Image (spheres, helix red, strand yellow):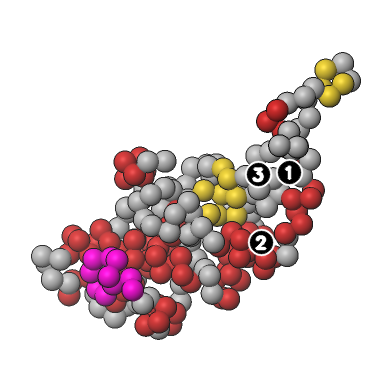
Amino acid sequence: MHHRDLQKTAPHRIYIQALNENGSSKDWKKSFLEDPNNKWLCDVPDEYINEITNTYGLADEIDNFNECKDIITHKIKSENIDPEKYSEVERNLPIAYGMIHARYIMSPDGIDNMTEKYKQKIFGTCPRYSCNNEPLLPIGISSQTKVSTVKVFCPCCRRIYEPRPPVSLDGAFFGPNVAHMLIDHLDILDHYLLYKPYVRTACGFKVYDPRFDTKN
């Protein structure tokens, strides 16, 4: 998916100051994660976000990162943001959270959270009949934002697919390595041995298909 397509589809719903039924302020992170479009994302603990080593370098990559981080961790309220910065901070909040998320899911606690989502088949199942509804894993084509939306990887046939139904989260929010980390953690490296490619037949005889020639 091209950069232009991603800009059209990526969700930029902003929850700076959502209100609950009583009219009191609800924190940004909770509101953001409650959006069904963001159900693939884990709830990154404030303690993880506040540890400076976990977010090192992100301030150089994301404009107004420190303000975004303080809103995410409830240190400041949106109304305390400089009015001239407000719209820019608002725009960068999902990106800041997503890039923190990409680091968190590589940590032991993050891997555990992603494992639970995998077991619940939050990321869907493989569309190939021979994979027997193998649960899929999220994967980003790039660790850079605005390159592509998140894809899904099947540990059985080892192919990458577009999520169904479509998911418009940026692939960088997951990165290219988490699927491999999860395969190792879940001890499912041998699932590819269960994969049996479709064999074309005619009158009971196998039909040669060069696409599945493993001799070359």
Read off the residue under disc 1: 131
Asked whether, in this view, residue 122 is left or right of residue 77, the answer is right
Read off the residue under disc 3: 126
| Mark 2 nearby-residue class (10 Å; few <14, some 14–19, many ≥20) | some
Q: Is 149 contained in the magenta span?
A: no
Residue type at numbered disc 2:
Ile
Question: Gap in Å between the C-alphas at discs 3 and 2?
Answer: 15 Å
Question: Gap in Å between the C-alphas at discs 3 and 1?
Answer: 6 Å
Query: Looking at this view, is 135 or 21 the one in front?
Result: 135
- Is the magenta region chiefly helix, strand or loop? helix
Residue 3 drawn at (x, y percent): 34, 44
* Residue furthest left as drawn: 84
Asked whether, in this view, residue 190 is left or right of residue 24, the answer is right
Read off the residue under disc 2: 183
Compared with 140, 60 (above or below) is below
Magenta region: 57-67
- Marks 3/1 in contact by CB < 8 Å: the verdict is yes
Asked whether, in this view, residue 206 is left or right of residue 88, the answer is right
Point out the image quarter for the N terminus. top left
